[in-house]
Image: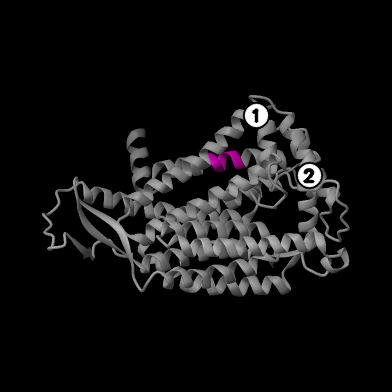
Amino acid sequence: MFNRLSYFISNNFFKGDKAVWMIYFFLCMISLVEIYSASSNLTFQSGHHWKPLISQAGFLIAGFIIILLIHRIPCKFFKLLPIVLLPFSWLLLLFTKFFGSDVNTSHRWMQLGQFTFQPSELAKTALILAVALVLAQSQVKIKIRTKNGIKTVARAISGGYSKPFKMCCWLIFPTCALIFTENFSTAAILFTVTTAMMIIGNIPRKYMWLECGALLLLVGVAIASLFILPNSDIEKIPRAPTWKARLSNKFCPDAKVDSVANISLQEAQKQETSALIAVSNSNIIGRGPGNSEERDFLYRAESDFIYAIIIEELGVIGGIVLLILYIVLLIRVGKIAQKCDRFFPAYLVMGLGMIMVLQAFVNMGVAVGLLPVTGQTLPLISKGGSSILITSFNIGMILSVSRYADKVSETRNEPAEPVSLNETDEYFSSIGMK
């Protein structure tokens, strides 16, 4: 009876890649345990011992419902989303920039009653959808004869090599520019992922070197300006004092910084110091869930520095297991992409997987002192409603693509009809285009 029930549930509710489902549930369980433990400051402020846990559980349940709905939608319909979502996210980013809630001298959040929403989370997903669509529409597959038989490869780019590159740039740069002034790390992560998508999408290397070179030059000039210009001029630029403080704290600890930012150099140093103490307090197996000492002293322990609390409580083993979960997720989306016979779902699933895993790596790097303080959350684990909901939406799309990939894999296992080639032993195929 139990076996029949589990079979019915798995085949009617949890469709798609089972490994992705398992990773999702593991991350949710870790989130509930560690949010309850790391939210001591929030509990003190609200006076409600269970409020942080109830809030996190509510968002995770809402995210689970989103996944159940989205993962049953055929992935071909996701092509319609960027047409609406990307312009809409631009409008939200502009609105937030001028009328958003001011937290730590940045306008990243929109106030929606008792809840806050971060438009940059929506913009990340919208841009990945748009870039995947452009790359898919610009490429075709061809069949060639090899020693091992007939092989299908991505070879040609419709409309010339420069057209898809220019179209991607027209999408990437405005989106990253709108995010950049209020959230540099998010813009950097998004740019990195979309650039990787373009490389995977067969954009010629000379264009990619040109793009990366121009960006590195621009970033180098901007960083140099932070340390060359007088503090009176820097304080006129939004978020610039905070950037200078964080860079000075990480790479120039002896530099003098006069910052009007709410998170000053001394506060950033306190955050990093508390996180490192939490890590050093741990051992192989950790202190056990709920036994963290630094959670009462670490600012934003429930979001930006939750990985430090996880290591303190679950030990080095717990930290490594969590790291492996994200790595396995990236491996799974890569295998899902390989199964796809169409470009759009393959590029989409790779983009969504990369941005989630890269964000996790950045958060972990900050928590253990490898990177400057960035404000990036740990996907599906850190406290944050908009991040959980949008990440759940992305996982729903990944699972939808995995359902499609499984169907393709089943079709490939069926006996194929003989294919005749022309005189050049090469032809364009309509199968798998776009």
Would you say the residues marked 1 and 2 are in contact, meaning their CB atoms lie under 8 Å apart? Answer: no
**Amino acid on which the number 1 mark rests in the picture:** Gly
Q: Please name the amino acid that badge 2 sits on.
A: Gln
Q: What stretch of residues is rendered in magenta?
A: 26-31
* 301 relative to 418, above or below: above
Numbered badge on residue 206: none
Is residue 428 visible in this depiction of the protein?
A: yes
Residue 155 shown in magenta: no
Q: Residue at x 25, y 61 (%)?
A: 142
Instruction: Report helix, strand or loop for mark 2.
Output: helix
The residue lying toward the viewer, choosing from 117 and 164, is 164
Marks 1 and 2 sit apart, C-alpha to C-alpha, by: 20 Å
Position in image of residue 393 (x %, y %): 50, 57
Q: Which disc is residue 315 wearing?
A: 1
Q: Residue furthest top?
A: 284
With 28 as the anchor, is 434 left or right in this view?
left
Numbered badge on residue 271: 2
Q: From the image, which quarter does the N terminus lie in?
A: top left
The residue under the point 37% across, 44% down is: 9
Main secondary structure type of the part rendered in magenta: helix
In the displayed structure, does residue 11 sit left or right of residue 91? left
Q: Report x, y in % for residue 12.
A: 35, 48
Query: What is the x, y in percent for residue 373?
Result: 72, 49
